[in-house]
Amino acid sequence: MWTMLIFKLIGSVLLISAASMITDWIFSGSKWAHQYFSAAPEIWRPMEGDTSKHAERTVITLSILMTFLFSVMYILFYFVMRPGLVFTSVLGRSVATAFFLWMLIPLPQLVTQHLFVKYHRAVTIMQLAGWFVKLLSASLIMSFLF
């Protein structure tokens, strides 16, 4: 029983990650997409470091790790938010909903965007904090009203 569950979880992470990476490559990494990105070259973060290939490899590796984080958080969200499985308190379910949605949507998107686009770290941190507060307040409001 446990072996099958572990295989299914690992398979889910790999399949979701592969689908996400292929989608990312089609919409932002392919040669077709790069022709539009080159219209504003001043907004892209220059690849600095020992060599540009090393810096580029580091940024791409970090963005792939964000994709794996997305996959794992989606699977956890799916299992934890099943009705009656984990949470019995309204407050616990509200905070967990906000946290998982924050980990699923704005965190991978904003961190990946920060890796490639010239943003100050403070801008990314403020955007992440703002999204967490928005999701938490919306989740708490919905939980206590319904």
Image (cartoon, rainbow, N blue to C red):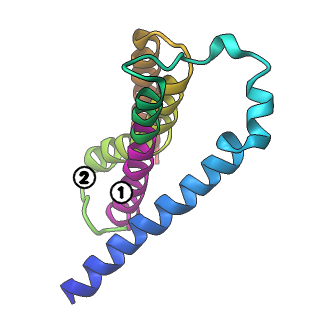
Q: Amino acid at mark 2?
A: Ser
Q: Which residue is mark 1?
A: 72
Q: Is residue 88 visible?
A: yes
Quarter-wise, where is residue 99 in the image? Answer: top left
Q: Please tell me which of labels 2 and 1 falls first in the chain.
A: 1
Residue at the (39%, 33%) spot, across then down: 58
Q: Is residue 143 visible?
A: no
Q: Secondary structure at mark 1?
A: helix
Q: Main secondary structure of the magenta part?
A: helix
Quarter-wise, where is residue 55 in the image? Answer: top left
From the top left corner, tell me how far across and down residue 108 is, in percent: 46, 38
Nearer-the-camera pick, 18 or 73: 18
From the top left corner, tell me how far across and down residue 133 is, in percent: 40, 25
Does the magenta run of residues contain 104?
A: no
Nearer-the-camera pick, 85 or 114: 114
From the top left corner, tell me how far across and down residue 14 is, in percent: 42, 66
Tag of residue 83: none
Nearer-the-camera pick, 143 or 57: 57
Q: Amino acid at mark 1?
A: Val
Residue at the (40%, 13%) spot, across then down: 121
Q: Which residue is mark 2?
A: 89
Left or right: 53 as drawn, with respect to 81: right
26 lies above or below 57? below
From the top left corner, tell me how far across and down residue 70 is, in percent: 43, 49
Nearer-the-camera pick, 51 or 67: 51
Q: Which residues are magenta?
A: 62-82
Marker count (numbered): 2
